[in-house]
């Protein structure tokens, strides 16, 4: 699956810092637009799609905290605040204004990139979870799961026999793609602690599901085993919500 480079807007009045951030992010597969103050920021947001905003607190004219509050009132765009001051009160103010993360200067550009990736991952996970919460049908690599009928169909459209326990586990994986799930958490999510179940039952169910959906169950690519971790469901999952009458 191709990954689209994120569009980052850097709002920083110090030219040297602004150029340094922009150069580092561009060298790490990001599209970058820069601005020196709130006015330039507003123009950039009008002219470009912005996936994440890096916003300095200390700006000429309207400060970053005020700008953060205005952006958050109109958008859920991820925001990372930068400041030369590292006091807890400044960090708390930034987060209260709606920032997703906060980084005090001076900082290592590698840390900024790590924060950007973490914030974007959280946003993507939240979007996926929200879509799946409303869904009645899930799709992955041609497979179709009907959540209302509790039915699994293969890419050819044929119905595949699946037990209730297998269905619940597969659904749990589909609702959390790309996440490492421990056997304990899978037990809690599918069977609960009152079921008298045990971790080994998860391994048995995973083995059964693999035999039904994996091209090669002995070399699983969709439900991967994570050593000392548990399992991870690797496919992209698409969700279809029920139609509403307008």
Image (spheres, helix red, strand yellow):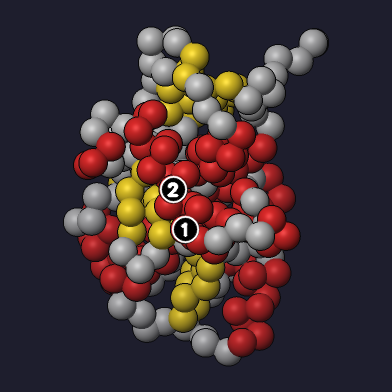
Q: Where's residue 168, x and y in %?
A: 59, 39
Identify the residue at horizontal 26%, vertical 67% (top origin).
20
Q: Say few, some or many: other residues with alpha carbon within 10 Å of mark 2 (under 14 / 14 to 19 / 20 or more).
A: few
Determine whether 197 is above or below 4 in the image: below
Percent position of residue 93, x then y: 67, 75
The answer to whether 222 appears left or right of 181 in the picture is left
Count residues near mark 1 (Cα–Cα under 10 Å), then give few for <14, some for 14-19, many for 20+: few
User: In the figure, 23 relative to 102: above or below?
Assistant: above
User: Looking at the figure, which quarter contains the C terminus?
Assistant: top right
Which residue lies under the disc numbered 1? 200
- Residue 224: give x, y in percent of width and height: 33, 48
Looking at the image, residue 61 sits to the left or right of residue 36; the answer is: right
Kindly identify which residue carries mark 2: 204
Q: Quadrant of residue 141?
A: top left
Q: Nearer the viewer, residue 39 or 149?
A: 149
Examine the rendering and report whether any part of residue 242 can be seen: yes
Mark 1 and mark 2: span between their CA atoms? 6 Å
- In percent of the image, x 44 and y 10: which residue is there? 157
Check the image and name the residue furthest to the bottom: 87
Outermost residue on the right side: it is 246
* Residue contact between numbered discs 1 and 2, judged by CB atoms under 8 Å: yes
Residue 48 appears in view? no
Q: Secondary structure at mark 2?
A: helix
Q: Identify the mark at residue 220; answer none if there is no mark.
A: none
Q: SS class of the residue under badge 1?
A: helix
Mark count: 2
Give the residue displayed 69% in from the left and 56% down from the top: 195
- The image shows residue 96 at horizontal and vertical percentages of 70, 69
Q: Quadrant of the N terminus?
A: top left
Task: Give me the residue at 39% from left, 29% from top.
Answer: 212
Residue at far left of view: 27
Q: Quadrant of residue 70?
A: bottom right
């Amino acid at each position: 699956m191709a990954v689209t480079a994120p569009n980052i807007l850097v709002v920083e009045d110090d030219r040297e810092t602004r150029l340094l951030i922009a150069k580092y992010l561009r060298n790490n597969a990001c599209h970058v637009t820069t601005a020196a103050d709130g006015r330039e920021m507003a123009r950039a947001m009008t002219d470009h799609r912005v996936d994440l905003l890096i916003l300095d607190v200390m700006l000429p004219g309207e400060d970053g905290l005020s700008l953060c509050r205005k952006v958050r009132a109109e958008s859920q765009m991820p925001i990372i605040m930068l400041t030369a001051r590292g006091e807890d009160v400044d960090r708390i103010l930034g987060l209260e204004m709606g920032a997703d993360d906060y980084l005090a200067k001076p900082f290592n550009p590698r840390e900024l990139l790590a924060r950007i990736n973490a914030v974007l991952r959280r946003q993507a996970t939240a979007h996926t979870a929200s879509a799946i919460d409303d869904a009645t049908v899930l799709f992955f690599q041609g497979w179709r799961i009907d959540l209302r009928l509790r039915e699994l169909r293969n890419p050819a459209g044929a119905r595949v026999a699946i037990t209730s326990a297998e269905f619940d586990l597969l659904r749990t994986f589909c609702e959390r793609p790309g996440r490492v799930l421990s056997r304990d958490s899978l037990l809690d999510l599918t069977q609960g602690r009152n079921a008298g179940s045990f971790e080994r039952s998860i391994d048995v169910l995973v083995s059964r599901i693999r035999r039904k959906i994996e091209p090669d169950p002995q070399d699983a690519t969709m439900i991967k085993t994570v050593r000392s971790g548990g399992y991870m469901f690797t496919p992209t999952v698409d969700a279809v919500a029920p139609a509403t009458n307008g």
